Image: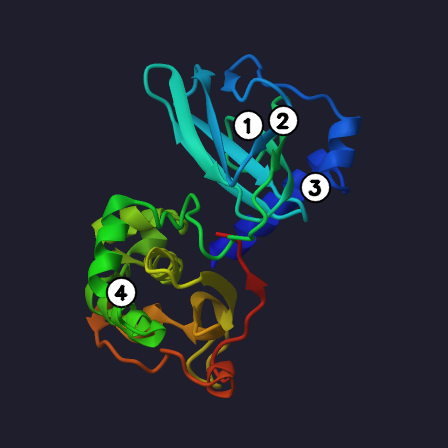
Amino acid sequence: MKSLRRILVFALTLTLIAGIGTADAWAAGYRVSFSNSEISITSPATNSVQCNGVLSISGTTKLGTVYFAVRGPKQELSGYQADVVNGTFALDINLRYGKGLYTIWAGPHPQKFDGSIRFVVENTEQQDKRNTASSYYVDSDNPAIKKLAATLAPSGLSDMEKLRNIHDWVTANISYDCSYHESGRENLEKASYILQKRDGVCSHYAILTAALCRAAGLPSRIINGPASLSDSVPRVNHAWNEVQVNGQWVAVDTCWDAGYTKGNTFVPAPSTRFLAPSKAVFAKTHTASLVTLY
């Protein structure tokens, strides 16, 4: 799938721009800037501002959308974007990778950052929340996501009961988008948009499942790797989830459990085949090659 390619290109682009090294070493050797000819960051206004888990950014621009790249204390990379209203923008970024220095880039393109705007902030929050906090795509703090998660996974249920309810809702209510490859649709979309649209491909199923799980208090991450339902069919790039149940990671594939395609038609056939199977059973069809940072 394209998401694996995209994150690798994204990482390579930032590596070429910023070089290798810690964020503090990078900040000491490169110019800090909050504006260029198209974008002006008004908050934060100084370098090395301290944040307790959340960075609030605002500014002005001539663009319709402003894109951000965030590099965590251990070189973790993630992307965000802010829509522009009347020449201004604002967004909150969860600093999900724990305590330390984060480098921020801003620019007009989602994958290419020339370094004309870059600065460093310090996160004082100790806890690593990469699998629990809301991100740009896994927007688990969206009101619609939170409302559905509260309905599916109320307090009092066990972790496994919460996961089963979320899995069963996704597999019963999200259809596979058979026109995806012809439509030019993005393979990365916000969970809240996928919930509204009610269809998608494997990456969309995984993003929505992760968001509902995080909103329900279940740590969740998205996995990329080759997969196939049959030994006679070559494995292709695929996306699924790992969800923490009672402190243990279990695999979940809501896309394949939703049904199957026949020609250019999706046939709903919800099942629980890929709901927390044993590691040995899951490995027969899926091979994890990348734990994403969505």
Q: Quadrant of residue 46?
A: top right
As shown in the figure, which amino acid type bears the numbered disc 2?
Answer: Arg
Q: Secondary structure at mark 1?
A: strand
Q: Could you tell me how far apart the alpha carbons at marks 3 and 4 are, in whole angstroms?
A: 43 Å
Which residue does the numbered mark 2 point to in the structure image? 118
Q: Quadrant of residue 268?
A: bottom left
The answer to which of marks 1 and 3 sits earlier in the sequence is: 3
Which residue does the numbered mark 1 point to in the structure image? 106
Task: Please provide percent x and percent y for residue 154.
Answer: 24, 64
Q: Secondary structure at mark 3?
A: helix
User: Going 59% across and 48% down the picture, which residue do you hit?
Assistant: 126
Task: Please provide percent x and percent y for residue 253.
Answer: 38, 71
How dense is the environment of label 1, judged by Cα within 10 Å: few (below 14), some, or many (20 and up)? many
Q: Could you tell me how far apart the alpha carbons at marks 4 and 1 are, in whole angstroms?
A: 40 Å
The answer to which of marks 4 and 1 sits earlier in the sequence is: 1
Q: Could you tell me how far apart the alpha carbons at marks 1 and 3 are, in whole angstroms?
A: 15 Å
* Dot in front, 4 or 1: 4
Q: Secondary structure at mark 2?
A: strand
Task: Please provide percent x and percent y for residue 82.
Answer: 41, 30
Q: Could you tell me how far apart the alpha carbons at marks 3 and 2 are, in whole angstroms?
A: 14 Å
Task: Please provide percent x and percent y for residue 185.
Answer: 34, 47
The answer to which of marks 2 and 4 sits earlier in the sequence is: 2
- Along the horizontal axis of the image, is 96 left or right of 275? right
Q: Could you tell me how far apart the alpha carbons at marks 2 and 4 are, in whole angstroms?
A: 42 Å
Front position in the image: 85 or 146 = 146
Residue 35's place in the image compared with 131, above or below, is above
User: Going 48% across and 57% down the picture, which residue do you hit?
Assistant: 131
Which residue does the numbered mark 3 point to in the structure image? 15
Tag 2–tag 1 contact (CB < 8 Å): yes
Which residue does the numbered mark 4 point to in the structure image? 155
Q: Secondary structure at mark 4?
A: loop
